Image: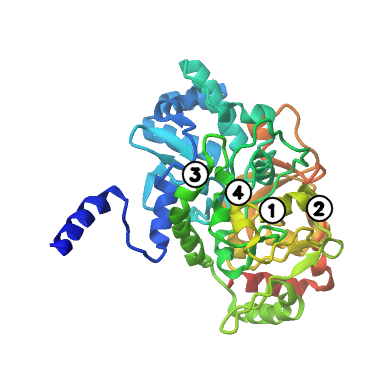
Amino acid sequence: MMERIFAILLAVLLPCGLVAEDRAPDPQAGYDHLINTPYLPPYFDQETFDNVWKVWPKTLRDEAEQADADKRRQMAFQRYGLTGRPEDPTKPLQYVVDQKGNWTLNCFSCHGGQVDGKTIPGLPNNRFDFAGITDEIRLTKALLGKKLVPTDYSSLVFPMGNNKGTTNAVNFGVALLSLRDADLHIVPGASFPKMLHHDMEPPPWWHFSKKENIYLDGFAPKGHRGLLQFTLVKENKAQAFRDREDDFRDVYAYLNSLEAPGYPGMVNQAKAHQGRIVFENHCSECHGTYGEKAEYPELMVPIDVVKTDRARLDSLSPEHREGYGKSWFNTYGEQKGLIADPAGYVAPPLDGVWASAPYLHNGSVPTLWHLLHPDQRPQVWRWKGLDYDHKHMGISVEVLTEVPSGLSSIDRREVFDTSRFGKSRSGHDFPNVLNEREKEDLLEYLKTL
């Protein structure tokens, strides 16, 4: 009799989610959560997106007016750096779109991009224009008489990214966590601290499985809770993070499952073989080895040694890192390995390095060829198109002598000026010890990783 009652209770409670069996985290479920579950408030609706072309410059607006709905969608995707999902090109990888047509930003906005015509989840999105889409969606809502939401004002009061493909994401985290206590309850009267605003390029997600600590400076021990910190908007109360833990255990498993994409072009195997010797003699100490005996050292390189732009390193204070380490995100300090005052940056793995242009953590170097030729890195460059540059291994660019005048804000973000704060192309000058033949061979070897 008791067994029958228990069976009835299970039948009633399981569909309600009140009783569940323990299960192993599911990578596929993690991907599904990211593209289908809104962890932030909706930003805009389908009607707004369908009408955003009406606020574009006249030439582009005239073209869109003559186009059908599918062509307009493609034009908007290209303008803002959105891509279709691999399984459904009509839906944006970078947004959750619910059944009511509400659009909500997801993690793929920065971590899902396109290279050589192929969309790759986990690839840094080097075309996403967070500021551009925010500004033009706000104008479209005003045109349609729609209610604005807090995100619509973001770019007016908080720097969101001076170049396509880069964002001020580190300071998003600093600002939002500063309003919470260790349990993630909002602190009444709390205000943003002084921040060092800067842009950076997101890292490839397939590096995740190789690391014990995450972020460029390697300060935070890896864990599923930390993945939730970019959902720290005021609308999400402290309990929301606890409720979503199982989802992000799946997301954690998904990140750990990702592998780098293979290079799609031709490889000169003889040159690549010589390049492997160059790599192992000059690069592997920091970036690890690849192949059958692959090993990644996760080496912290002091800033005075790597000499790349230090804005990212200086943007987090020891107090901020310690505050994160004592919070729910780091299980109140139970996860060991937090580094409150890192000496520099962690040299990344180079799996799939061919795909992740532009280079250096701030996206200041457009190709691997330029990375290997420090004295020939352009001071000012502009996107030339979306075609992949197989010769130089990176994005196709036009080298400029100065920033052109009279550009619209969205076109201005196509131009990378390395003289601006946080945008320096300097540092990582280790390739200077190589001769030109060694650099050519090394470039060929990097295709194989």
Q: As drawn, is 155 to the left or to the right of 95?
A: right
* Residue position marked by numbered label 3 in the rendering: 239
Whether residues under marks 4 and 1 lie with C-beta atoms below 8 angstroms apart, the answer is no
* Residue position marked by numbered label 2 in the rendering: 310
Name the N-terminal-most of marks 4 and 1.
Answer: 4
- The amino acid at mark 4 is Asn
Say which of 265 and 23 sits in front. Answer: 23
Which quadrant would the N terminus be assigned to in this image?
bottom left
Name the N-terminal-most of marks 1 and 3.
Answer: 3
- The amino acid at mark 3 is Gln
Q: Quadrant of residue 381?
A: top right
| Residue lying at the far right of the rendered structure | 304
- The amino acid at mark 2 is Arg
Q: Nearer the viewer, mark 3 or mark 2?
A: 3
Whether residues under marks 2 and 1 lie with C-beta atoms below 8 angstroms apart, the answer is no
Q: As drawn, is 240 to the left or to the right of 442?
A: left
Q: State the image coordinates of residue 189 (x, y, percent, origin top left).
A: 68, 30
Q: Which type of secondary structure does the marked residue at label 1 adopt?
A: loop
Which residue is found at the position 56% from the left and 33% from the top?
Answer: 133
Name the N-terminal-most of marks 4 and 3.
Answer: 4
- How many residues crowd around disc 1 within 10 Å: few (fewer than 14), some, or many (20 or more)? many
Q: Which mark is residue 126?
A: 4
Q: Which mark is residue 366?
A: 1
Q: State the image coordinates of residue 246 (x, y, percent, origin top left).
A: 43, 56
| Residue lying at the far bottom of the rendered structure | 293
- The amino acid at mark 1 is Pro
Q: Which type of secondary structure does the marked residue at label 4 adopt?
A: loop
- How many residues crowd around disc 3 within 10 Å: few (fewer than 14), some, or many (20 or more)? few
Q: Nearer the viewer, mark 2 or mark 1?
A: 2
Say which of 436 and 292 sits in front. Answer: 292
